[in-house]
Image: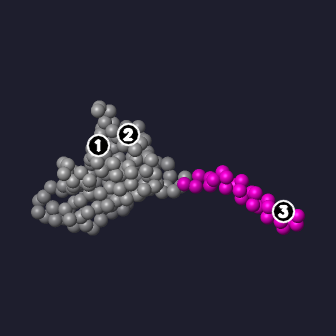
Amino acid sequence: MSQLAALAKRCALSACVGLSFGPPQANADEARWRLFDQGTDALLAIADTDEPGDAFGLPLLSCTQKTGYVSIEGEAKEGIRTVMAEMIRTDQAPRINVAPDANAESATIDLFYSFIDGWRYKFGVQVSHKIFDRFKRDGVIDFKFGKAEVHEEFKVGLDNVGKFLDLCASSTK
């Protein structure tokens, strides 16, 4: 066997052995839904590390554990800000319809400004709301605020969604 053929054989064997172990922590620093259990509170956020910090993507979800209630926070894009301005001008309550339970009691949305990343919205719903069925399965949150239709979607790390909701679920059934 020539030296070149022997070298090629060793390289091929090394590659096969290396690939059999898979990539080392290939997804460890990937942006994904990550669960942060903070004792009495829990946070579900899009982040690229399991270390607590303030570099989270939006939307993010939070709760006080075992209360049965989840807060959802995201970027308030122009459509939401325009509807909110009209509601303030006409003295209306800022109510939203959260899909797919459009006939259920609507939630109140808050609008606030963050010096880090601008205007944000925040609203809360019960853990039992049907919005979480689709969120657990597809990573989708939909709601309607006046003429503004909001669609939030992020699919990586959905295994943490169920764990988060379990932490938030009410301890009394």
Q: Give the magenta-colored segment's residue range.
A: 1-27
Q: Residue at x 69, y 55 (%)?
A: 18
Q: Most extreme residue toward the left, as rendered?
A: 90
> Depth-wise, is mark 3 or mark 2 nearer the camera?
3
Residue 100 in view = yes
Question: What crowding class fits label 1: few (fewer than 14 Cα within 10 Å), some (14-19), or many (20 or more)?
Answer: some
Which residue occupies the foreground of this view, 104 or 67? 104
Q: Is residue 19 magenta?
A: yes
The quarter holding residue 167 reads top left
For marks 3 and 2, the one nearer the N-term is 3
Residue 6 numbered tag: 3
Q: Amino acid at mark 3?
A: Ala
Q: Quadrant of the N terminus?
A: bottom right
Q: Residue at x 27, y 46 (%)?
A: 129
Q: Amino acid at mark 1?
A: Ser
For marks 3 and 1, the one nearer the N-term is 3
3D distance between C-alphas at marks 1 and 2: 11 Å
Q: Is residue 60 magenta?
A: no
Residue 64 numbered tag: none
Q: Which residue is mark 2?
A: 166
Q: What main secondary structure does the magenta stretch of the protein show?
A: helix
Q: Residue at x 62, y 55 (%)?
A: 23
Q: Which residue is mark 1?
A: 128
Q: Most extreme residue toward the top, as rendered?
A: 172
Which residue occupies the foreground of this view, 153 or 137? 137
